[in-house]
Amino acid sequence: MTDYCFKILFNLKTSRPFILLLMFFLMQSCEEDMTKVNQGKKTNFASQVIFNGTIIQRDSGQVKVRFKAPLIEKYELIDSPYVEGKKGIYLEFFDKKNPKVPGKIWANYAKNNIKKDFYFAKGRVKIITTEGQTFVTETINWDKSQHKMYTKDTVFVSDKDGNILVGAHGMVAKDDFSEYTFFNNSGSFNSTNLPATRK
């Protein structure tokens, strides 16, 4: 009787690794089959949808950004998650130089790549800085990690004094608009604001 019990216990002990190995391979084959099944399925759909949304971003109790859009969709079930405003956006941003007067951005479409912290807007993009300058262009890219905004489209700039500047081949600017460079520019300036030239 003891020999028979010993053989059963021995067989269970030696077969345990075999059973575990068999279960591992079965699970792996199931996972592989599921990836084959999911290959044809659409995974790029909005996981969150907000209608007539207002988003406020604060830092140390101070409002930094106020964002409004009729439709905000968040796509987070993909490798490069993003947020999209397909029906236009309005954004107010506040900076340290002029915290009471916000800068403003309007666009017909906007997209934010979450991982890269990169923003793109297009369609009648209008930016009014906290200093009162107005930038109008068709597209704008904002690399937030590099603190840089740029476009290759024509940019029209005007200020409260009536000066107008056109960057025919786009611009590159710091994201606070303290510095900017225009490409192939032209414009008209109010002569009373130009410094006097020496004779």
Image (spheres, rainbow, N blue to C red):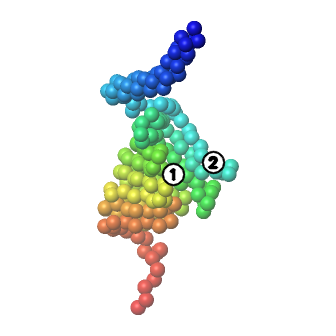
In percent of width and height, residue 98 lies at 60, 60
| Depth order, front residue of 121/162 | 121
Quarter that holds the N terminus: top right
Q: Give the foreground label among 2 and 1.
A: 2
In percent of width and height, residue 187 lies at 36, 67
User: Label 2 to label 1, Cα distance in Å?
Assistant: 16 Å
The image quarter in which residue 100 lies: bottom right
Task: Specify which label sits upstream in the sequence, 2 or 1.
Answer: 2
Type of amino acid under label 2: Arg
Marks 2 & 1, CB-CB < 8 Å contact: no
In this view, the residue farthest toward the right is: 61
Task: Give the residue drawn at x 47%, y 62%.
Answer: 174
In percent of width and height, residue 34 lies at 38, 25
Using the image, determine if residue 175 lies above or below residue 58.
below
Crowd around label 2: few <14 · some 14–19 · many ≥20 (10 Å): few
Q: Is residue 31 among the parts visible in the rendering?
A: no
Q: Residue under label 1, please give it.
A: 104
Task: Give the residue drawn at x 31%, y 61%.
Answer: 169
Using the image, determine if residue 157 lies above or below residue 138.
below
| Depth order, front residue of 193/97 | 97
Crowd around label 1: few <14 · some 14–19 · many ≥20 (10 Å): many
Q: How many marks?
A: 2
The secondary structure type at the circle numbered 2 is: strand
Q: Residue under label 2, please give it.
A: 58
Task: Give the residue drawn at x 41%, y 91%.
Answer: 199
Task: Give the residue drawn at x 57%, y 45%.
Answer: 66
The image quarter in which residue 101 lies: bottom right
| Depth order, front residue of 98/73 | 73
Q: Is residue 136 among the parts visible in the rendering?
A: yes
Type of amino acid under label 1: Lys
The secondary structure type at the circle numbered 1 is: strand
